[in-house]
Image (cartoon, helix red, strand yellow):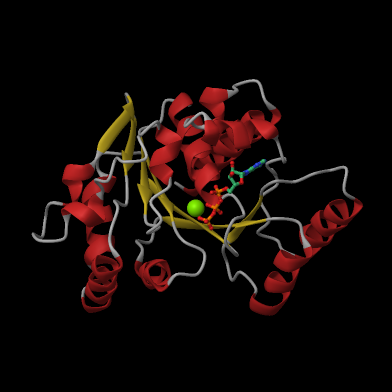
Amino acid sequence: MTVVALSGIRGGVGTTSVVAGLGFALHLLQQRVLMIDLHPRNLLRLHCNLALDAEQGWASVDQDAEGRWNEALLQVVEGLYLLPFGQLSAAELGALAQRQQTQPQEWPQRLQTLQAHFDWILLDLPATLPAGQAALPLLPEATLRVRVVETDAACHALLSTEGAGDDLLLVNRFDPISQLQRDLLLLWGERHAQLIPQVIHRDEAMAGALAWKSPVGHYAPDSLASHDVRSLATWLLAQEVQRV
Ligand SMILES: Nc1ncnc2c1ncn2[C@@H]1O[C@H](COP(=O)(O)OP(=O)(O)OP(=O)(O)O)[C@@H](O)[C@H]1O
Ligand SMILES: [Mg+2]
């Protein structure tokens, strides 16, 4: 039972797409998987064929009464589950942020309850929003933290100035045609021991998957990105076998 917390080193690097793809790939490896959207934009649901106006999520059902958050749990396919964030107004988001500050143990406790039922829990966290940042230090010990990065100068600057601590680094949208990207990948391999040895390539199939509202492995199983994500799932599984 492993919790993987994924967040971008900055916004837009493909974190939500990776969570959806990885969840599906782990499911194909016979793992019981739950994907939790902790990003107030509530977009993970769109990778799981939910409608734009599907507004229910853990944060929306939790507005008035404690303990109802898990009513928003959805089965995507057998063995693969989703807990959407839900659609909240600005005022509701403010109230939620306040509650997260006064009750910081809330999510770690929820994760402990959930862990018995799943082999993997994948968290889609925002890159910089305070709500996500607040949750991170309190996640359970079993948590693997993955920072999603792109091999571009902006991510390079952020990695150089802010670092990534012990977080694993996952390169998404890698394009081997670009000399700059190849150079950065080489450099990061030398500098960052925690760089995951499997990149996810830039691939139209990944973009098409969201347009089709499904994880990449479902939308285009033979695509390069789908193979990448499957290898990533196998790599993570192997890490966990070694760790136990
Ligand atoms: N490997 C890839 N190749 C091509 N397109 C990709 C790839 N990964 C993600 N995308 C596309 O990039 C866009 C942004 O992806 P996504 O929403 O997953 O990013 P994010 O990091 O979660 O953004 P945010 O910071 O807003 O949460 C989407 O249109 C997605 O389809
Ligand atoms: Mg996202």
> In the rendered view, would you say 219 is above or below 231?
above
Quarter of the image where the N terminus is located: top left
Question: Quarter of the image holding residue 74?
Answer: top left
Q: Residue drawn 32% across and 46% down? A: 84
Q: Could you tell me residue 98's position as x and y percent? A: 25, 76
Q: Could you tell me residue 194's position as x and y percent? A: 65, 59
Q: Is residue 178 left or right of residue 123?
A: right
Q: Could you tell me residue 72's position as x and y percent? A: 21, 43
Residue 90 in sight here: yes
Q: Could you tell me residue 22's position as x and y percent? A: 51, 38
Q: Residue drawn 56% across and 63% down? A: 167
- In this view, the residue in front, 176 or 2, is 176
Q: Residue drawn 45% across and 37% down? A: 47
Q: Residue drawn 32% across and 23% down? A: 78
- In this view, the residue in front, 144 or 225, is 225
Figure disc tally: 0
Q: Is residue 118 left or right of residue 160?
A: left
Residue 231 in sight here: no
Return the residue found at the far right.
Answer: 179
Return the residue found at the far top.
Answer: 222
Q: Is residue 172 left or right of residue 48?
A: right
Return the residue found at the far left.
Answer: 65
Q: Is residue 202 left or right of residue 141?
A: right
